[in-house]
Amino acid sequence: MTNTKPIIAILGASGHGKVVADLAEQLGYIVNLYDDSFPKNTLLEHWKIIGTFSDLLSCDKSNCEVFVAIGNNQVRKQKCDELMQHGFSFATLVHPVTTVSQYARIAAGTVVMAGAVINAFAEVGCGCIINTSAVIEHDTKIGEYSHICPNTALAGAVNIGKCCWIGIGSQVIQLISVGDNTLVGAGSVVVKNLPANVTAFGSPAVVVKSD
């Protein structure tokens, strides 16, 4: 009997790769892992690592979707850009135990983990990580390659820039904007707009470093 399950090529065989591989398997994919630690490392738990990033670039793109499971925003963006240039199609992975409005938009290459809520007219850019139990409220926009960490809550009409990191357990009140490449430390409460390229921390969050 011919196997009709779709194949997904996942780049990244670390902790985030484990979670993404588990989710992809739950969604019915056959998982092939790629990581530049190959051939020194050939397994991630029970999943086989079958090649490097270069191997992935040269494989048959008509036979599978790809997904970049790398936690670092900048590295994830770089690898996604290269894969796009080579004409690969990206999977969008949404855990079955989530609440996603029919009016929300989630771009390709994004993962939405278990327990997350994405409400009406929210927009999530490509290559994002919406992590476990994160809440994205109505009309909120999240720029490409940003990571919204576990148990983070973004209130209505928040605007998160590209390649941002909103740390675990943080809260961002309504109508706030966070600039590109900004990192918000764990457990912070953001009550004022934050510029691009800074690190902010605390309750209320204040800028502690400018990059």
Image (spheres, helix red, strand yellow):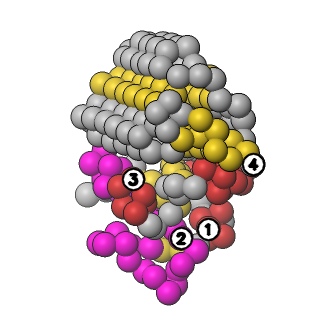
- Tell us which disc is closer to us: 1 or 4: 4
Asked if the residue at tag 4 contacts the one at tag 1, i.e. Cβ–Cβ closer than 8 Å, the answer is no
C-alpha distance separating marks 1 and 3:
17 Å
C-alpha distance separating marks 2 and 3:
14 Å
The answer to whether 11 appears left or right of 80 in the picture is: left
* SS type, badge 2: loop
Q: Can you give x and y, in whole percent of width and height, for residue 140 in the image?
A: 52, 19
List the residue tagged with mark 4: 211
* SS type, badge 1: helix
Residue 53 — which label?
A: 1
Q: Is residue 50 above or below residue 208?
A: below
**126 or 10: nearer the viewer:** 126
Q: Is residue 172 above or below residue 88?
A: above
Mark 1: amino acid = Phe
- Tell us which disc is closer to us: 4 or 2: 4
C-alpha distance separating marks 3 and 4:
30 Å
Q: Can you give x and y, in whole percent of width and height, for residue 168 in the image?
A: 41, 44
List the residue tagged with mark 3: 20
Mark 4: amino acid = Asp
